[in-house]
Image (cartoon, rainbow, N blue to C red):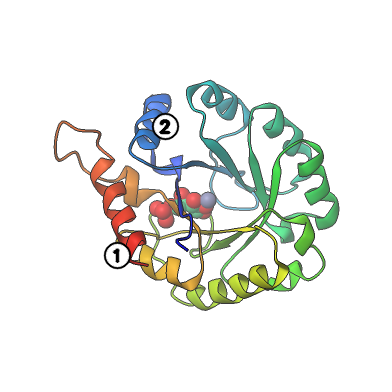
Amino acid sequence: MSKQFRIAPSILSANFAKLGQEVTDVIASGTDIVHFDVMDNHYVPNLTIGPLVCESLRPVTDAIIDVHLMVKPVDRIIPDFAKAGANIITFHPEASEHIDRTLALIRECGCKAGLVFNPATSLSYLDYVMDKVDMILLMSVNPGFGGQKFIPETLNKIRQVRARIDASGRDIWLEVDGGVKVDNIAEVARAGADVFVAGSAIFGASKDSDANRYDTVVAAMRAELAKA
Ligand code: DX5
Ligand code: ZN
């Protein structure tokens, strides 16, 4: 049975001066999910976009909007993102005082909930909440910036999470974020991921024809995934 793989372009690397068009183009190129990176210059040393931008993008696309919160505290911004049209909200467990409560809050707001693990964060946070997560996001770079190099030790962590998900019997998505490119996406898939965030690899693609700028790189990623 072939697995369903989803590609999630990270708009962190998009041109913010024409963000709506960027989202339309990148989804039209055959991607599935808008990965929306929220950074607060506190939990991570960078500052990006908030609920107002999510609200502006919502009418532009029917695609899933996947909000990756790199903020501390976490809880008070969740209802705002839910109202702004987010479909999935993930957060870093060490940025929340009460992980179980934060997961419940996200679901009460009508969104899918997920936990994000930095490269050196222990998976033990999952021990008591496996039935309360819809997605697990593994960072393959340290959070804060696009364009970093994939940390290879992540592959083993992906395998561990895949085993835990399979043992749970639940349809939990396993997303990987950071340094994913055409040349390593198949390896990430073989390790067990099914959602692939890619920022610089997609939005950094150069225009090589009059066709949609992102068609070539997304097709190359799909071809690699087909081999995985
Ligand atoms: C980093 C962000 C990522 C980032 C990925 O903290 O969470 O989503 O945009 O960018 P690339 O694909 O360029 O590593
Ligand atoms: Zn992200």
Name the residue rendered at 65%, 27% in the picture: 84
Residue drawn 73% across and 37% down? 77
Q: Secondary structure at mark 2?
A: helix
Is residue 145 among what the camera can see?
A: no
Q: Nearer the viewer, residue 105 or 151?
A: 105
Outermost residue toward the front? 1
Name above or below for residue 132 compared with residue 67. below
Vertically, is 194 above or below 56?
below
Mark 1 or 2 closer to N-term? Answer: 2
Q: Residues within 10 Å of mark 1 (few under 14, many from 20)?
A: few
Kind of residue indicated by mark 1? Asp
Q: Which mark is residue 23?
A: 2
Q: Is residue 173 left or right of residue 103?
A: left
* Amino acid type of the residue tagged 2 in the rendering: Val
Label 1–label 2 contact, CB within 8 A: no
Q: Which residue is mark 1?
A: 183
Residue nearest the viewer, comparing 169 with 93: 169
Does residue 192 appear left or right of residue 84 in this picture?
left
Instruction: Kindly state the secondary structure of the residue where label 1 is placed.
Output: loop
In the image, residue 39 sits, relative to residue 92, either above or below, namely above
Q: Is mark 2 within 8 Å of ligand 1?
A: no
Front position in the image: 174 or 208: 174
Classify residue 21 by image quadrant: top left
Looking at the picture, how far across and down is residue 126, in whole percent?
74, 67
Which quarter of the figure is the C terminus placed in?
A: bottom left
Residue under the point 75% across and 47% down? 73
* Residue 49 rendering spot, x and y as whole percentages: 55, 35
